[in-house]
């Protein structure tokens, strides 16, 4: 498979395996610890920022470290 291509079956399996409850709980706990209201909008802001600015680099670092 070329760059940007993926196996849809594997994508679905990974998607089902990822526990979104754990992610949601972490975001809400951290919002509270920082004194920020636990709202859907605030959680969205945090998660979208992580997706855009941190997750791609974190995934690459993990792949390079593990494989």
Image: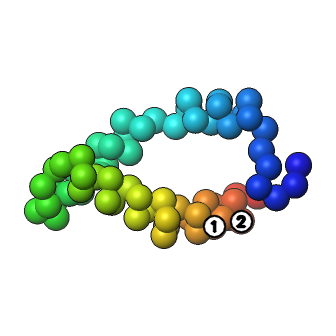
Left or right placement of residue 18 versus residue 39 in this view: right
Q: Residue shown at 77%/55% (left/top)?
A: 4
Quadrant housing the C terminus: bottom right
Residue 1 place in picture, x, y as percent: 88, 49
Quadrant position of residue 32: bottom left
Mark 1, residue position: 61
Q: Nearer the viewer, residue 38 or 19?
A: 38
Q: Nearer the viewer, residue 3 or 13?
A: 3
Q: Residue shown at 38%/45% (left/top)?
A: 23
What's the colour scheme? rainbow
Residue 21 place in picture, x, y as percent: 36, 36
Q: Residue most toward the right?
A: 1
Residue 15 place in picture, x, y as percent: 58, 35
Q: Residue shown at 45%/35% (left/top)?
A: 19
Left or right placement of residue 12 versus residue 45 in this view: right
Residue 34 place in picture, x, y as percent: 16, 64
Q: Residues within 10 Å of mark 1 (few under 14, many from 20)?
A: few
Distance (Cα) linking label 2 and label 1: 5 Å
Mark 2, residue position: 64
């Amino acid at each position: 498979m070329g760059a940007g291509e993926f196996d849809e079956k594997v994508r679905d399996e990974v998607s089902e395996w990822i526990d979104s409850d754990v992610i949601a709980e972490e975001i809400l706990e951290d919002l509270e610890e920082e004194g920020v209201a636990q709202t859907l909008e605030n959680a969205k802001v945090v998660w979208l920022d992580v997706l855009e600015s941190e997750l791609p680099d974190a995934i690459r670092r993990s792949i390079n470290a593990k494989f």
